[in-house]
Amino acid sequence: MPGFFDKNRKYIAILALFLLLFWLVTIQVKAGRFTLLERPVLAVSGFFERIITGTYNGITGTVRGYVLLVRTERQNRRLAGELGTLRLENQITNELLSENERLRAALGFMKLNPPASVTVQVIGRDSSPTSSTATVNKGSLAGIDRDLAVVTPDGVVGRVQAVLPKPRVCSS
């Protein structure tokens, strides 16, 4: 054991001095007054207090930062999923808006030409280098005849080539 005290004499003296100063400050604080040793005692004890407080603040700051990063990463994953869902919903909404605009144009066209027009739906298309043919869902029973004009909201696009009782074929 004597070898331990010889090797660590410096550290033991510093520890003893620190304890003595701490004890003196404690006595002065309890008594409610400070004496001549106030400044050196507070300077030495303040040095150790700053070391301990700085170490503690550094460790707690690191732990809080890590926990914050983990939460942020979790939140990023959740938000990325929400973003994908919202993008899909946005695409669907844009398609519905486009369809709505097309239907409004068709309704407007029907209001301009109500008595002599028949509204049909294209159910088939055939294109060749010289012409384009469409098959629609109505025929002679709906009042469609050969050589009638085929008109869309964009204007005249062709004429009726052949008529069957139900479907009809028109070309442009």
Image (spheres, helix red, strand yellow):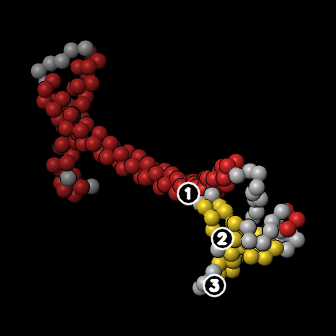
From the image, tell me which residue sits under label 3.
128
- Three-letter amino acid code at the position of disc 3: Ser
- The answer to whether marks 1 and 2 mark residues whose Cβ atoms lie closer than 8 Å is no
For label 3, count other residues whose C-alpha is less than 10 Å away and answer few (under 14), some (14-19) or many (20+): few
- Residue 17 percent location from the top left of the image: 18, 37
Looking at the image, is 22 positioned above or below residue 6?
above
Q: Name the quadrant of the C terminus.
A: bottom right
Which label lies toward us, 3 or 1?
A: 3
- 66 or 55: which is nearer to us? 66
- Residue 67 percent location from the top left of the image: 45, 50
Disc 2 element: strand
Q: Quadrant of residue 148?
A: bottom right
Q: Which residue lies most toward the top here? A: 32
From the image, tell me which residue sits under label 1.
87
Q: Which residue lies most toward the front here? A: 147
Horizontal side of residue 93 vs 118, given as left or right: left
- Residue drawn at 29 percent across, 18 percent down: 30
- Three-letter amino acid code at the position of disc 1: Arg
- Three-letter amino acid code at the position of disc 2: Gly
- 60 or 104: which is nearer to us? 104
Q: Quadrant of residue 19?
A: top left
Measure the C-alpha gap from mark 3 to mark 1: 38 Å
Looking at the image, is 169 positioned above or below residue 20?
below
Measure the C-alpha gap from mark 2 to mark 3: 15 Å
Disc 1 element: helix
Q: Is residue 4 visible?
A: yes
From the image, tell me which residue sits under label 2.
158
Which label lies toward us, 1 or 2?
A: 2
Q: Quadrant of residue 7?
A: bottom left
Q: Name the quadrant of the N terminus.
A: bottom left
